[in-house]
Image: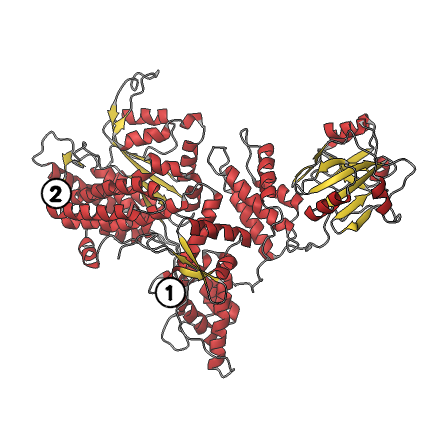
């Protein structure tokens, strides 16, 4: 309102424009334009309008719109006297130049008459006044002292034209009217990203970076004529879905919005991809397929739901077989494509839906050509040649030989647990249950044994982090784990103390539980880490407290109204069981948390992408007798654990925890393993982040080897115990490299990492630059920046080919892997 009243005070007749727009708010705007402050105040109390200024004789005003660098250069070359300048939100080289005219002069509106990048506003025209806001920014300038129009400009203006409002500036007419399915999917993905932000502000929770990323995404879309999304529509979506609170509101959102628009000025989103036929649901496809393939050799159910042999990068062969057999069975290509897409072999394609669909339909068309060739239609079958896959599978680190693996896999309690878990859940997500084995053993045996380290005894408590998508079995796995712990600690149930306490409340609970195992558990791990990094006073000091508790010490509360906890020290066997999503944790973590020492204490599990098998969702019931004996196995294990603990303690009367030594063989193998692990970090581009994690990794393996020995009733770690722990650790170390790789300091770094990951996924870890452009959702000039960064850091080499293109290759030994 202030800017509008100021313009009226200068004598300009003004009228309201729609909020965040250049269009008049009301019909008949020419007649309602006024300088009356009372009327203007009423308008702006109604809504947060922009305001327009009438041009022409009514305000003795003529405005020249310079729309680009070429226009600015041409204008300057004419030597016209300088007018009052208003900077438009469209960019630094797009300005309005205001001139006064006398009341007798009627000058025309013109469009590209003076120059291809120059329009003018005269009789019957309008301009947005300074202070008006658009989604792209604010009009800025001072119009209190406007000079007369230069005679030289008057001399070259064309003849008077029909006085109509020139709306070309306001609403471009060359955009598509209806959003494509591809555009709608992109908008839905952006909305999902905003909706996933935590509802309570915390510094580092990703609100700024996610808002900026989505704003850049939308900006490129609404600047492109191939998308129906408008700037106003994009901003409305963001305002509706980006969470706000006292620390983060509309002003902060608009600040990020303006920054994103400035950084993406002139960038257009890629043309929406081709629209493919609808893929029918897999349940319908399976229903219409025969039981066996036409050759009678394989079951269609097996082809769809069983994992193929070999690595995921070779699963395209299994998809090809499935596509061909479906077509041979007379099914439409849409059903064949659906079967391949939803199959286990199709999971690499589903990692990137847009690129995956492109690849799927290429494979489907090739399969159709093969079948057509078999039936005499003239198409030639394609050979089974090796080619790169869309699956971005990282190099896998191996810590042991196959001979050692056979020794480590000898039956032990963990094998029993996995077999039992398989009978209890419909879909067994093995990484979750494998991690829970160690949580159980740590809780049960942490009060029996310890690591005899020269720097001082180390407890057997473990910090665990389990990551996976929703509905992939984390809760079911946790429920089974809790049932075993409940049987093992019948007089101290629950051992689980939750995971949503403030530092003081946590201290109070642990002081009361002096010397007992305590399980800190939450299924919102990313939220916990976001809160610890923010300025929330109730979570202040939680990172430091967790580090203390890992070492077994419970700091005293020196000032408290509760006499039973004030000034009392305690010890704890503190175990964490944190669960969350990979995406959530990626957004929550930063590099400092790896260097500080909190994250290196954790061992990581990442869940598998599960595919339902026939009968997965059939109703499962138990009769009364089975229900009564549901906890039979946990109770049996509880008795076994008690007996093993007694055996270990035999002859050690009075000792609360017993040092468990490694045999010479086990100690040598552990040392070799640790040396190799540390060599993986040497020279790595994220060496600073990896080293603390890999040092702690060795400590955790030592703990786990001792737990294997204790569950075996032994007071010494044998080579077999050590190998069992190392085999489990192969999974954890790969996850450490995965999470460190995804913990980067900026959206730019993450984009650079994605390009590197795509190059590494191709055969021979090399690819032509054109494929990188095609794979990336970013504009070509940004992809070039990412590639330049990779080359400058020595992560990728760029070699010119004979046809003047470029071949990009991962620099060897950038990610060290076991031979």
Q: Residue at x 89, y 35 (%)?
A: 102
Image check: 527 left or right of 464?
Answer: right
Residue 313 seen in the figure:
yes
Residue 779 seen in the figure:
no
Check disc 2 and report the residue beneath it: 716
Q: Is 383 rendered above or below residue 145?
A: below
Q: Secondary structure at mark 1?
A: helix
**Rendered location of residue 648, percent (x, y):** 12, 39
Image check: 578 left or right of 353?
Answer: left
The N terminus is located in which quarter?
top right
Check disc 1 and report the residue beneath it: 314
Q: Pick the residue in front: 451 or 400.
A: 400
Q: CA distance from mark 1 to mark 2?
A: 43 Å
Image check: 778 left or right of 161?
Answer: left
**Rendered location of residue 497, percent (x, y):** 33, 32
Q: Secondary structure at mark 2?
A: strand
The C terminus is located in which quarter?
bottom left
Q: Earlier in the sequence, mark 1 or mark 2?
A: 1
């Amino acid at each position: 309102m202030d800017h509008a009243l100021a313009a009226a005070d200068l004598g300009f007749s003004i009228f309201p424009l729609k909020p965040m727009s250049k269009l008049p708010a009301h019909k008949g705007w020419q007649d309602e334009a006024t300088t009356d402050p009372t009327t203007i105040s009423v308008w702006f109390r109604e809504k947060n309008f922009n305001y327009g200024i009438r041009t022409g004789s009514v305000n003795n005003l003529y405005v020249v719109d310079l729309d680009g660098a070429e226009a600015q250069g041409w204008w300057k070359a004419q030597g016209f006297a300088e007018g009052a300048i208003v900077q438009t939100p469209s960019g630094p080289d797009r300005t309005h130049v205001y001139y006064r005219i006398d009341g007798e002069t009627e000058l025309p509106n013109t469009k590209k008459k003076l120059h291809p990048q120059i329009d003018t506003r005269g009789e019957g025209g309008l301009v947005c006044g300074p202070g008006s806001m658009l989604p792209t920014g604010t009009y800025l300038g001072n119009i209190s002292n406007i000079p007369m129009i230069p005679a030289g400009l008057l001399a070259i203006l064309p003849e008077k034209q029909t006085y109509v409002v020139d709306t070309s500036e306001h609403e471009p007419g060359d955009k598509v009217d209806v959003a494509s399915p591809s555009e709608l999917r992109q908008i839905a993905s952006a909305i999902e990203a905003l909706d996933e932000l935590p509802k309570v502000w915390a510094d580092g929770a990703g609100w700024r970076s996610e808002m900026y990323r989505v704003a850049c995404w939308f900006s490129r879309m609404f600047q492109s004529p191939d998308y129906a999304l408008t700037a106003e529509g994009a901003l409305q979506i963001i305002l509706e879905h980006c969470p706000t609170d006292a620390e983060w509101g509309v002003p902060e959102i608009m600040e990020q919005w303006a920054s994103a628009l400035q950084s993406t000025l002139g960038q257009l989103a890629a043309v929406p991809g081709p629209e493919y036929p609808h893929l029918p649901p897999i349940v319908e496809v399976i229903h219409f397929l025969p039981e066996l393939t036409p050759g009678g050799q394989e079951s269609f159910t097996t082809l769809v739901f069983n994992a193929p042999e070999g690595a995921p990068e070779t699963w395209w062969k299994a998809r090809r077989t499935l596509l061909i057999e479906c077509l041979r069975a007379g099914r439409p290509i849409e059903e064949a494509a659906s079967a391949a897409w939803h199959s286990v072999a199709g999971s690499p394609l589903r990692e990137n839906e847009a690129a995956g669909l492109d690849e799927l339909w290429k494979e489907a068309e090739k399969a159709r050509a093969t079948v057509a060739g078999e039936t005499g239609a003239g198409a030639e079958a394609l050979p089974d040649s090796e080619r790169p896959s869309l699956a971005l599978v990282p190099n896998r680190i191996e810590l042991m030989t196959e001979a050692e693996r056979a020794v480590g896999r000898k039956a032990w309690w963990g094998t029993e647990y996995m077999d039992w878990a398989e009978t209890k859940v419909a879909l067994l997500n093995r990484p979750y249950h494998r991690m829970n084995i160690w949580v159980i053993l740590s809780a049960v045996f942490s009060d029996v044994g310890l690591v005899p380290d020269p720097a001082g005894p180390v407890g057997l408590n473990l910090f665990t982090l389990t990551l996976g998508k929703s509905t992939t079995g984390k809760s079911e796995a946790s429920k089974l784990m809790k049932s075993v712990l409940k049987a093992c600690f019948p007089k101290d149930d629950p051992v689980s103390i939750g995971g949503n306490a403030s530092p003081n409340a946590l201290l109070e609970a642990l002081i009361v539980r002096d010397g007992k195992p305590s399980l800190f558990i939450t299924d919102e791990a990313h939220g916990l880490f976001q809160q610890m990094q923010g300025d929330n006073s109730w979570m202040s000091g939680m990172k430091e407290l967790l580090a203390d508790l890992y070492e077994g010490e419970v700091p005293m509360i020196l000032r408290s109204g509760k006499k039973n906890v004030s000034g009392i020290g305690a010890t704890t066997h503190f175990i964490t069981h944190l669960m969350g999503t990979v995406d959530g944790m990626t957004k929550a973590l930063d590099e400092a948390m790896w260097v500080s020492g909190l994250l290196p204490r954790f061992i990581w599990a990442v869940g598998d992408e599960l595919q339902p098998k026939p009968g997965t969702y059939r109703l499962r019931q138990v009769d009364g007798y089975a229900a009564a004996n549901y906890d039979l196995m946990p109770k049996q294990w509880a008795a076994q654990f008690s007996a093993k603990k007694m055996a270990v303690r035999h002859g050690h009367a009075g000792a609360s925890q017993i040092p468990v030594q490694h045999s010479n063989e086990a100690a040598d193998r552990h040392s070799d393993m640790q040396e190799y692990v540390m060599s993986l970090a040497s020279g790595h581009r994220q060496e600073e982040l990896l080293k603390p994690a890999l040092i702690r990794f060795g400590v955790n393996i030592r703990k786990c080897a001792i737990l294997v020995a204790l569950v075996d009733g032994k007071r010494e770690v044998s080579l077999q115990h050590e190998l069992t722990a190392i085999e489990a650790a192969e999974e954890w170390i790969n996850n450490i490299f995965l999470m460190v790789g995804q913990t980067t300091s900026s959206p730019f770094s993450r984009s650079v990492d994605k390009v590197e990951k795509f190059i590494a996924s191709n055969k021979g870890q090399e690819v032509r630059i054109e494929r990188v452009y095609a794979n990336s959702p970013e504009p070509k000039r940004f992809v070039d920046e990412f590639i330049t960064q990779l080359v400058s850091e020595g992560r990728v080499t760029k070699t010119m080919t004979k046809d003047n293109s470029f071949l990009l290759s991962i620099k060897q030994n950038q990610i060290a892997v076991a031979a």
